[in-house]
Amino acid sequence: MYDHSLQFSLDESESPGEEALSRAAPTAAPEKAAAQERVLLDAYSNAVTAIVDEVGPSVVRLDLRRDDGKLAGAGSGFMVSPDGLVVTNAHVVGAARTAEVSTLDGRKFSARILGRDADTDLALARIEEDATFPTAKLGDSKALRRGQLVVAIGNPLGFDASVTAGIVSALGRSLSSNNGRMIEDVIQTDAALNPGNSGGPLVSSLGEVIGVNTAVIRGAQGICFAIASSTAQFVIGEIIRHGRVRRAYIGVGAATHVLPRRLALHHELTQASGALLTHVENGGPSDRSGLMTGDVIVAIDGATILGAGDLVRHLDAEKINRVCSVDFLRRSEKRRVWIAPTERRG
């Protein structure tokens, strides 16, 4: 006989809507957990998508022309001003004076090359037509950390608006430029780059350009390089003002060097690194002042030097033929010398 004691009845105070919710609860919990798991698993994709949506429209393709009108090469670039300033690589523009710029929405414009700097493999072009363009924001490459998510956008092998993602593999690398000089403060990434990616932006998870893609080591897996945005900001400003990058010259080679914490505390230095001199040219301004290989420069004219990149940026046009103070560490001793930089030629 059916046992009525096993039957359940609605309490008079319980509404049908509440009953439906109570019956659905056992299945709702797993569905909610699954939805949360999908959100967590897709966070990476969402981050990359947001970066591409924000920066992608500013990325362009450059087709370079010789004086006779023949195609001289192609590469990528990105807009940094609404009136059409385009940042790219010096090796992309080469000796060309003009370029055809293609935007993501299919428009084509003519541009002239404002200037190029082979020492940093950076160049600046300006679109000649009157139009307003989406721009990318240059971020602070000094704030980067190894392992940080980055996205590269460009036109590799003619495939426009291609996107790759990876991480910052290393910071403060040195890379030989086409003219043989070393580019300092280079970012290493494993975001895949191919021919045609050169000049395109390397973008942080904040949607800011923290590097300009420049090179890949042939035959290597995931070893690619970008010029730091802090270097790009300096070069852009110099080209706009002078049409080229004027630099003070002190006759040294340098690398970023981490300072022993004990030594930094002893000399009351707030910084964690400086510029280690790897080479001092005989008879150059630094040699005449008494600087030696192995010295670590920590300041120029009172401005903190955190590494080789800072040293290059602080040796700007304002210091040419002007006596500057240089604070440095030699072994455990802090010293100061005075240098009169000359203007670097070639």
Image (spheres, rainbow, N blue to C red):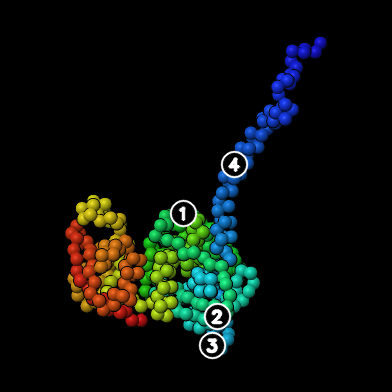
* Residue labelled with disc 3: 67
Q: Amino acid at mark 4?
A: Glu
What count of labels does the image hold?
Answer: 4
Query: In the rendered view, would you say 332 is above or below 58?
Result: above
Mark 3 vs mark 4, CA separation in Å:
58 Å
| Occupied quadrant, residue 171 | bottom left
Provide residue 305's location: percent of width, then percent of height.
30, 63
Q: Who's the residue at 42% across and 55% down the image?
A: 145
Identify the image quadrant of residue 62: bottom right
Residue at left offset 50%, top offset 83%: 97
Q: Nearer the viewer, mark 2 or mark 4?
A: 2
The Cα atoms of the two marked residues, 2 and 1, are separated by 37 Å
Mark 3 lies on a secondary structure that is loop
Residue 283 image-quadrant placement? bottom left
Answer with mark 3 or mark 4, whichever residue precedes in sequence: 4
Crowding around mark 3 (Cα neighbors within 10 Å: few <14, some 14 to 19, many 20+) is few
Would you name the residue on which mark 2 appears?
128
- Residue designated by label 1: 148
Calculate the distance from the C-alpha at mark 1 to the C-alpha at mark 3.
43 Å
Label 4 and label 1: CA atoms lie apart by 23 Å
Q: Earlier in the sequence, mark 4 or mark 1?
A: 4
Q: Amino acid at mark 2?
A: Glu
Q: Which mark is residue 37?
A: 4
| Amino acid residing under circle 1 | Gln
Describe the element under mark 1 as helix, strand or loop.
loop
> Left or right of 126: which side holds 285?
left
Mark in the foreground, 2 or 1: 2
Say which residue appears at 61% left-offset and 69% top-offset: 104
The extreme top residue here reads 1
